[in-house]
Image (cartoon, rainbow, N blue to C red):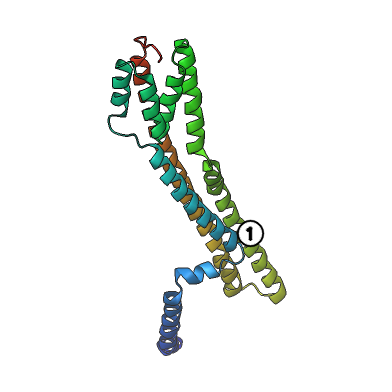
Amino acid sequence: MTLAYLLLQVIQDAPSAIDSTAAANGAADELNVFNLLLKGGFVMIPLLILSLLSVYLFIERYLYIRKASYMEPNFLNNIKDRLREENVRGALELCHRSTFPIARLIEKGLSRLGSPIRDVENAIENTARIEIYQMEKNLSILAAIAAIAPMFGFLGTVVGMIRAFYNISLADNISIGIIASGIYEKMVTSAAGLIIGVTAHILFTYLNTMIDRNVNKMEVTAIDFMDILHKPIPVR
């Protein structure tokens, strides 16, 4: 008799359980990324600023480094031809008309012709350091964003936990609804902070790779230029 009663009770409660599950699934379907971001709280504001700043820094540095990596076709050959003709002034004018960093390195070396070869090398190296510094400018900010963004995310989660336990103390009731609503909303900040931090780190690494390629190109060009200078060239 008791078993039959329990089975009857389960059958009667099944429709309401299905309806509750469907309602929960419907609520989950309505929850989208934008709504989750809004639930993150005030910590999402600095995270939004950091994300926009990282995108701006990447685009600005990418365009600058890409422009700095350009070198006119046959530029070094044209310099070599003018030096073979003992036309140092023409080589200097060719460098002066060019705007890419490698031309400035060659121009600085040409301006030191007549000095010991070591002085020419030092002049090129010092100019290269300045050009590398210009390419690396503001990259430290992007690296800082990669480190700071996850910290802001964890801060948002801690604030959410504090609020959740505060609500529990006010309600004097440890229910799943009170705990879960405070925690899952604030864990959004942790996810957002990690995403921004990882993205900023990837962008920082990519820009550093571009700079390394440019530095290698500058070194190869400087070596080729110094090979040209092994033959003494009178300065006009």
Q: Amino acid at mark 1?
A: Val
Can residue 85 be seen?
yes
Image quadrant where one finds the C terminus: top left
In the image, residue 121 sits, relative to residue 160, either above or below, namely above
* Front position in the image: 229 or 92: 92
- In terms of secondary structure, where does tag 1 sit? helix
In the image, residue 37 sits, relative to residue 6, either above or below, namely above
Image quadrant where one finds the N terminus: bottom left
Q: Position of residue 204 (x, y in %)?
A: 47, 43
Which residue in the structure is indicated by mark 1? 158
Q: Position of residue 213 (x, y in %)?
A: 38, 33
Res. 95 image quadrant:
top left
What residue is at 57 percent from the left and 57 percent from the top? Answer: 153
Horizontal side of residue 66 vs 128, given as left or right: left
Number of callouts in the render?
1
Can residue 219 be seen?
no
What residue is at 58 percent from the left and 62 percent from the top? Answer: 45
Circle 1 packing at 10 Å, graded few (<14), some (14-19), many (20+), is: some
Res. 211 image quadrant:
top left
Q: Position of residue 122 (x, y in %)?
A: 49, 18
Q: Position of residue 134 (x, y in %)?
A: 50, 37
What residue is at 49 percent from the left and 49 percent from the top? Answer: 57
